[in-house]
Image (cartoon, grey):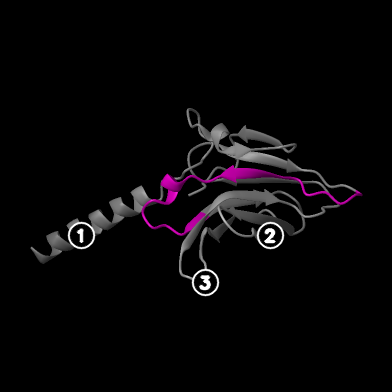
């Protein structure tokens, strides 16, 4: 009886994990990702390559330039995405270049100044990035991010990234 209870508990935990891992954007057919992703001047294509969840990912070509540019795209966040107290947006990113590439992100909040960060993405290696999307003011009031901008800061060389599984 003890084993049966343990198995049932384990199955319940696995089911909860699977439900919690459902992405808000995964670039699959029938998904309304266009309402949430603003590519700006970046070439963004949905392709059957390097998918983490489902069969497709978003391939984003971020061009380099001799002049200072910040090529990138926006992800619009909705309050219902994080209704269960989730304080994080995570996603997978991959690139095919031979060198490590730097990816930047900016979190825009309903109130206050944006937050700027970035990280290195190793060559030909999928990396999971997690961004804290909630911050507290001096009085302890919560302020959620409303938008994430993924971009490259003043790149001199071209780079194509594949993005998937925003959750």
Q: CA distance from mark 2 to mark 1?
A: 38 Å
Give percent across and percent down for residue 116. Answer: 67, 61
Residue bounds of the magenta highlight: 66-89
Q: Is residue 43 at least partly visible in the picture?
A: yes
Question: Is residue 95 covered in magenta?
Answer: no
Q: Nearer the viewer, mark 1 or mark 3?
A: 3
Residue at the bottom extreme, as displayed = 138
Q: Quadrant of the N terminus?
A: bottom left
User: Answer yes or no: do the residues labelled 3 and 2 have beta carbons within 8 Å?
Assistant: no
Q: Earlier in the sequence, mark 1 or mark 3?
A: 1
The label on residue 63 is none
Residue at the right extreme, as displayed = 66
Element carrying mark 1 = helix
Give percent across and percent down for residue 68. Answer: 86, 52
CA neighbours of label 3 inside 10 A, class few (<14), some (14 to 19), many (20+): few
Element carrying mark 2 = loop
The label on residue 138 is 3
Residue at horizontal 90%, vertical 49%?
A: 67
Q: CA distance from mark 3 to mark 2?
A: 37 Å
Give percent across and percent down for residue 156. Answer: 86, 52
Of 167 and 121, the residue lying toward us = 167
Question: Residue 73 is drawn in which quadrant?
Answer: top right
Check disc 1 and report the residue beneath it.
9
Q: CA distance from mark 1 to mark 3?
A: 41 Å
The label on residue 122 is 2
Residue at horizontal 48%, vertical 70%?
A: 139
Of 149 and 138, the residue lying toward us = 138
Residue at horizontal 74%, vertical 41%?
A: 61
CA neighbours of label 1 inside 10 A, class few (<14), some (14 to 19), many (20+): few
Element carrying mark 3 = loop
């Amino acid at each position: 009886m003890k084993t049966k209870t343990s198995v049932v508990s384990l199955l319940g935990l696995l089911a909860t994990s699977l439900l919690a891992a459902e992405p808000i954007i995964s670039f699959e057919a029938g998904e309304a990702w266009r309402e949430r992703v603003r590519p700006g001047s970046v070439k963004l294509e949905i392709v059957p390559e390097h998918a983490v969840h489902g069969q497709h990912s978003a391939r984003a070509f971020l061009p380099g330039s001799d002049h200072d540019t910040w090529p990138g795209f926006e992800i619009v966040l909705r309050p219902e995405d994080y209704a269960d107290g989730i304080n994080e947006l995570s996603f997978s990113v991959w690139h095919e270049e031979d060198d490590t590439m730097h990816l930047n992100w900016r979190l825009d909040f309903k109130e206050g100044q944006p937050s700027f960060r970035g990280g290195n993405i190793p060559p030909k290696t999928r990396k999971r990035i997690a961004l804290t999307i909630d911050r507290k003011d001096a009085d302890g009031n919560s302020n959620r991010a409303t938008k994430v901008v993924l971009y490259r800061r003043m790149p001199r060389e071209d780079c194509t990234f594949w993005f998937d599984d925003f959750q």
